[in-house]
Image (cartoon, grey):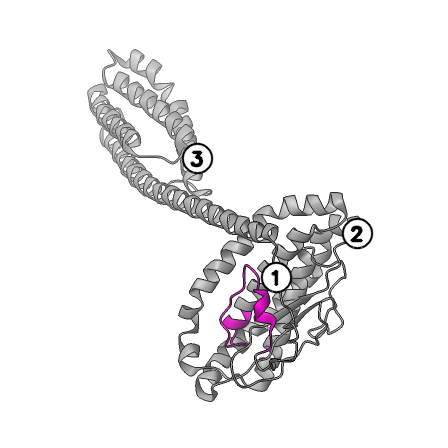
Amino acid sequence: MTTTTTTSRAVDGAPVPPALLVEPIRGRGRLSVAFRLLLVLPQAVALYLLSLVGVVVVLLGWLAALVLGRLPAPFARYLAHLTSYATRVNAYLWLLTDRYPPFRLSADDYPVRVELAPGRLNRLAVLFRLLLAIPAAILSTLATGGWLVSSFVIWLLVLVLGRVPGALFDATTAVLRYSMRYTAYSWLVTAAYPWGLFGDRPALGAAVDAGPAEEAPPRPGLLVLSGGAKLLVALFLVLGVVELGAAGAASVVAAGNLRTTTEARSDFTAAYDTLTARIQQYQQQVADCGARPELACVQAADAELAGAFEAFGGELRRIEFPASAQDEAAELERRTDRIAGAFRELSTAGGPRAYERLASSTQQLGNDFDRQAQAVAEALSGTGAPSG
């Protein structure tokens, strides 16, 4: 690898894509690999905090670039260093190096370096940067997502071998480089559109101004992938597509479940409120029957209440409950049928004694019904009971 110092100085002329330089040391300490996720956590926290500042800098820089045609120097310097720092952390996480990243924005002596040169920006391209970046964002998301899907297998392979196989090393470098280039383009640190996911052609290393008799030096960070490395990059893309499709399908299912749950909760609450209002009317009807009510007066109220419970049971069977509440709803249906049947028997009891014997069980049936109704409401919403 050609040793090149990371720079953030502005250059004029044709935009130069950021280069990623990784020292090709493939041996890995198994202990470091085993605890890589744990070791990288402090770096992830630091990177998160720095990125929060970076979001503000990008927004302000976007406005400034529309006017100036370039990022202000302090903004460009911070975002270039932040891009480099994020790349070092990801390289360590992705097992491209065993050396722990330093907690600083600039680290020219680190084995993973970014050569980045902010420069002039096209104001029209700045204005539509979000739209322009969409294709690169999709490609970067798919490649990175596919690598992450494969990450456990990669981690296990490196842990067992104690080294990163050459094709895997180069393919991972290619994915990381493309992700870095996409980030730099999105953050306005470069005007060069992201490319090179499948590596570079050797001819691209020739210097543009090299004379016919002089040998052109290779471009810093030139990455020429073998056939195996390209196949791995293609595999990452395929896995990324599968992962994205699975996530999309899961989102559709989740949205459908949410819609079903919301509708069921609304319908259940409305039916329960109607039943609650009917129970209150029943209590008033019984009170209107007098201190020593005639049996026929009370039984007329019982018959109406039995009809109210039967109607509530019909509403329960009509509602499409989500899977999380189907068992509770089925049990509530059974208890609704029992209490409706009990009040129906009360309404046809042959005399006071028969009525009293049947009425003794209705209080317990009512308590069981209330508890089960609350269980259904909690299954639909997680907390609380049905209103009313």
Q: Amino acid at mark 1?
A: Val
Q: Which residues are magenta?
A: 183-207
Q: Position of residue 335 (x, y in %)?
A: 37, 24
Asked whether residue 265 is in view, the answer is: yes
Disc on the earlier residue, 1 or 3: 1
Q: Amino acid at mark 2?
A: Gly
* Disc 2 element: loop
* Mark 1 → mark 2, Cα distance in angstroms: 27 Å
Asked where in the image residue 44 lies, by quadrant, the reply is bottom right
Q: Amino acid at mark 3?
A: Ser
Give the residue number, with chain letter if any, for mark 2.
29
Q: Residue furthest bottom?
A: 68
Disc on the earlier residue, 2 or 3: 2
Residue shown at 64%/80% (left/top)? 213
Asked whether residue 388 is in view, the answer is: no
Residue 56 horizontal side relative to residue 91, left or right = left
Residue 190 horizontal side relative to residue 266, left or right = right
Which of the image's four quarters has the C terminus? top left
Disc on the earlier residue, 1 or 2: 2
Give the residue number, with chain letter if any, for mark 3.
324
Query: Does the magenta-highlighted stretch encompass residue 199?
Result: yes
Q: Position of residue 37 (x, y in %)?
A: 69, 52
Query: Does the magenta-highlighted stretch encompass residue 4?
Result: no
Between residue 245 and residue 1, name the one nearer to us: 1
Between residue 300 and residue 91, name the one nearer to us: 91
Q: Residue furthest front?
A: 213
Q: Position of residue 267 (x, y in %)?
A: 30, 40
Give the residue number, with chain letter if any, for mark 1.
224
Between residue 136 and residue 233, name the one nearer to us: 233
